Image (cartoon, helix red, strand yellow):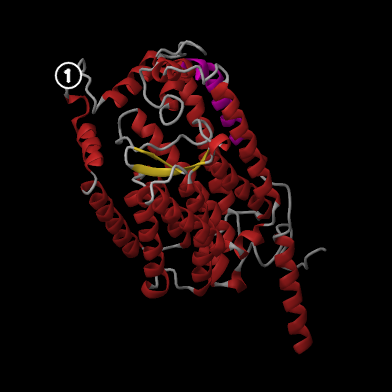
Amino acid sequence: MQTAGRLSSRVSTTAREIVQRRHRPDYQIALYMGLLMLLGLIVMYAIGPQRAHVLNNAYGTDYYTSMYFFIKQTVSLMLALATFIALALIPYKYLKKYAVKILFAGLGTCVLLAIMGNLMHLPLAQCSLGACRWFDLGPLGSLQPAELLKFGLLVFTAGFLGMRLQQGKVNDLHRTLIPLGALMLLAAILVIGIQKDMGTGIAMVAIFASMLMVAGVSRKVGVVLLGTALALGVLMIIIAPHRIERIITFLDGDTNDSMTVDDANYHITHAKIAIGSGGAFGVGIGNSVQATGYLPEAINDSVFAIMGETFGFVGLTVILMLFTALLLRLLKVADHLPDPWMKLAVAGVFGWLGSHVILNVAAMIGVFPLTGITLPLLSFGGTSMIFIAGALGLAFQLSRYTVHGSLNKESNYENPSSRRGLGRPRYASRGSTPRA
């Protein structure tokens, strides 16, 4: 009996190893990411000269050449691709091992930025309108520590929730919910409160929410958490006058005279003009009017509106289809991963990417207040693109470990003896032994 028990144990272990063996990754993740990056580079090449001309006139300089923004975006894209490849190749176990250190690095750099910018007023901290969000690295560009914090939250929370999931304590108040709530509150204070970056704060909440949903948090706990998040969000809006102004502008909507454009609704008005001017097929590459100085942040937060003007309704539909396809691939990968950490990590990447896309697009078409959040892989800038590409690289690596058939939490974690995916390889029958 002991021999039979040991044999059964070895067979079960071998079967799990066969199921989780490395196999061909999901190359569609890389394909959709590459196509979006290419579109962003094309638009940057088209509107870069216009943006450079506007800045040179505004500052009375000739510093910005016609190729300045295209070259900068190309460098950012290359760094993002390198990060994608690195996270696709570096074994994910290293991220699990050093998750706490990555999280502390994100928290530490945010605290350091607050001290250098808000207290010491050092030039290394790049501040704008009272908000210090970047480190100014000179010729190397800038670094936004909130992006590192998002990645740290992703890998740490995946490990923390994965452990609690295996222990059956996802809904435990003291061992799970309070520690995660304290971490989320600390991150919100640093990013939303000190850095005054509501968009990034919402993205962090989306990462947490996606993981909690996949981990199987109860409906009652979910409602309480949602209510708490909304209450804190309202508080963050009340204590910030510029956020109240944005909410008022959003609520006014199109009730004001459409011919009246003031400082409050200038941005959203010209974003709508850009999208509307594109018609069905757009005005063509290099013919954008709003990029000549009318639409603020034309190469950053407002790039979706510029793409609407350039490529029209059809072009925007294609762009949204690419994002949708990428998000659906992430959901499919997460649904077929047997390991809790892997499943939760990919779910977090989905929440991260999806929140950016929804918030940016919704703001540009006027169905959500402006939050100042980038459109992933398309907006100008290095830090956001690099870290999102790195997160997608991690998802790409984890797609090597998917198994056949959809998995749910009951079959994965709570009843090992009845697992279909983990107990045997996908080609084994109930009466056969796994083939090596």
Asked if residue 344 can be seen in this view, the reply is: no
Name above or below for residue 324 compared with residue 230: above
State the image coordinates of residue 205 (x, y, percent, origin top left). 39, 52
State the image coordinates of residue 189 (x, y, percent, origin top left). 34, 55
Dividing the picture into quarters, in which one does residue 21 lie? bottom right
The range drawn in magenta is 33-50
Q: Amino acid at mark 1?
A: Asp
State the image coordinates of residue 223 (x, y, percent, origin top left). 30, 59
State the image coordinates of residue 11 (x, y, percent, origin top left). 75, 73
> Which quarter shows the C terminus?
bottom right
Label 1: few (<14), some or many (≥20) within 10 Å?
A: few
Q: Residue at x 21, y 36 (%)?
A: 245
Query: Looking at this view, is 88 or 315 the one in front?
Result: 88
Q: Residue at x 28, y 59 (%)?
A: 228
Residue named by callout 1: 257
Q: Residue at x 49, y 55 (%)?
A: 106
Dividing the picture into quarters, in which one does residue 225 lie? bottom left
Q: Please tell me whether residue 352 belongs to the stretch shown in magenta.
A: no
Extreme residue toward the bottom, this view: 1
Q: Main secondary structure of the magenta part?
A: helix
Asked if residue 435 can be seen in this view, the reply is: yes
